[in-house]
Image: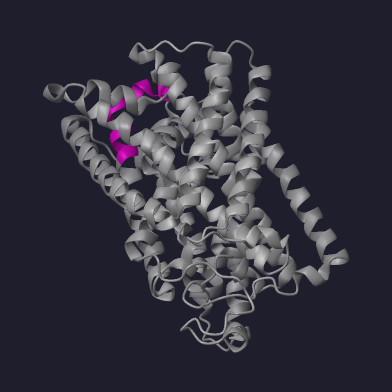
Amino acid sequence: MAEENKHGSEDNVGYKDYRHLKYNQLTLRHAVSQAIGLNAPGGTIVLYVAGTAALLTFTFSKYPNGAFSIPLILLLALIVYSMMSYSSYEFSKYLSSAGGYYTFVANGLGSGFGLTTALSYISYQILSFTGFGILGFIGFAYAILPSLGIALPYVNILWIPVTVAFILFVSFLIYKGIKPSLKYVSYAILIEVIFFIATSVYLIAVNHSTLTVKPFTAIPVGGNFIILAAMMVYAIGTFVGVGGSIPIAEETKNPKRNVPLSIIASIFILGITIILAAYSEVISWGYSNMLNFGTGSGIGAYPVLSIYKNSFGMLGLLPFAILLIIVINSFFTATVSLGTNASRVLFSLSRENVIPEKLSRTNTKGVPVYAVLFITVISMIIVLSTGIAFELLYPGRVIDALLYASVFLLILESPITYIVHILTNTSLYLFLKKNGKKAHVVRHIIIPGISSVTLIGAIIAAIYFDLSAPYIYGVYGSLIWVVVIFATVLVMYTKYKKHLENLGDFSL
């Protein structure tokens, strides 16, 4: 490949032209942990399952029990995301760089599309960092603490200093280095996955008399598969962590083996854990009660909390207490992973002279400190402005406002995420042909093509159904964000094209 000719062989000799991150810090275990930690299965099971249910119930009120199809929606989302990830899996066998997806696309479609991918990827990582990691955590805490008898003073403004402190603490941990944080994440994720699989199996066993395959059918939504497609716009975000190991490839031992393996392992682990948990939730809740699944207030807004609080017999509140600890930790680990990945992509853009050189400066532990600082500041601006805006839209309803702000940012990120994967899918075949690699029609054209068509269809369905407020704000906001990204790329490509000459050039 061109990279190896310019920069040397894979023994890391010959990279003096570019700054680089610290090599061989991480193992396969760390790579898998980064991906699953970024996905945050605990937070996802609590927030995404309830959020998807509420979105479906509010938007398609004709089907009050429609949320019983949540397991099918998640299964379809997993299938689509697996197809989305296939191109990444193939690319990661050949390219290993902190640039991640944009390095893939730049080597297939060229620098203009590479920059589009870079800006889109950074956008959705920061939107996940803020919408899921920060506002998701704050909304969760605001909803459950009063239900636990903990009174919160100054509820309208308390979330602001808590948010600032949370972001600063996460940024400090990222600054301290990737290996220590991932060592902790790897153990936390193991406990998290075992807990949810074990408790989900228990809940299914307890409710064995009501077991049914109906949650894996379209019957609860009247057989309307278009509704299922519309819900996938939101539900696909359930599995965004699958490619979480790609931007840390440069720091991973034997990345062209371990990163592809981490993608496969993440799909398998997340799929089993999240879909099994969702099935146990709807079975425990009951088909006839689905109108109230995820649409209540306080603890009722998160049905999994009510289920774990009341369903474990002699174990009492112990599983519920463990659940709370795991979910809070899940938001925390996800935020660290998201911030880490975003900082790596900024670092890569900087060392390739696309953005200011300062963002590629690292400390003695190989951490791009100015990139981390940039993400810290931007994240604070997004969280505070979005949270305050929704408080103004919903005065006196601070819990709803924070929940809506979180969902707004998560919906906002979805089409931006799709752009990354559509461009990656489109790049794969071209990359293989350019570099004299064997290309297979089914694996490298048809599977990526089906993935891209599905994503485009899901976006169209979301716009067609005109989701109810405040959810539709995220769809419209995303369209505006995409236009801004395209406009930025157009300006860079026409007026500052020389800054794009090295885009995607670095790979181990």
Dividing the picture into quadrants, the one containing residue 463 is top right
Dividing the picture into quadrants, the one containing residue 18 is bottom right
State whether residue 438 is above or below residue 135.
Answer: below
Viewer-closest of 382 and 8: 8
Image coords of residue 420 (percent x, y): 61, 58
Image coords of residue 457 (percent x, y): 61, 51
State whether residue 381 is above or below residue 338.
Answer: above
Image coords of residue 236 (percent x, y): 50, 47
Viewer-closest of 162 and 51: 162
Image coords of residue 309 (percent x, y): 26, 22
Q: Is residue 223 magenta?
A: no
What coloring was used for the rendering?
one colour
Residue ID at (75%, 43%)? 480
The reply to whether residue 146 is in sight is: yes
The image quadrant where one finds the N terminus is bottom right
**Left or right: 471 as drawn, with respect to 52:** right
Tally the marks: 0
Residue ID at (49%, 25%)? 139
**Left or right: 29 as drawn, with respect to 241:** left
The reply to whether residue 466 is in sight is: no
Q: Residue furthest left?
A: 314
Viewer-closest of 222 and 458: 458
Q: Residue furthest right?
A: 495
Q: Is residue 292 magenta?
A: yes
Viewer-closest of 456 and 31: 31
| Magenta stretch bounds | 277-294
**Left or right: 474 as drawn, with respect to 450:** right
Residue ID at (57%, 28%)? 59
State whether residue 421 is above or below residue 465.
Answer: below
Q: Main secondary structure of the magenta part?
A: helix
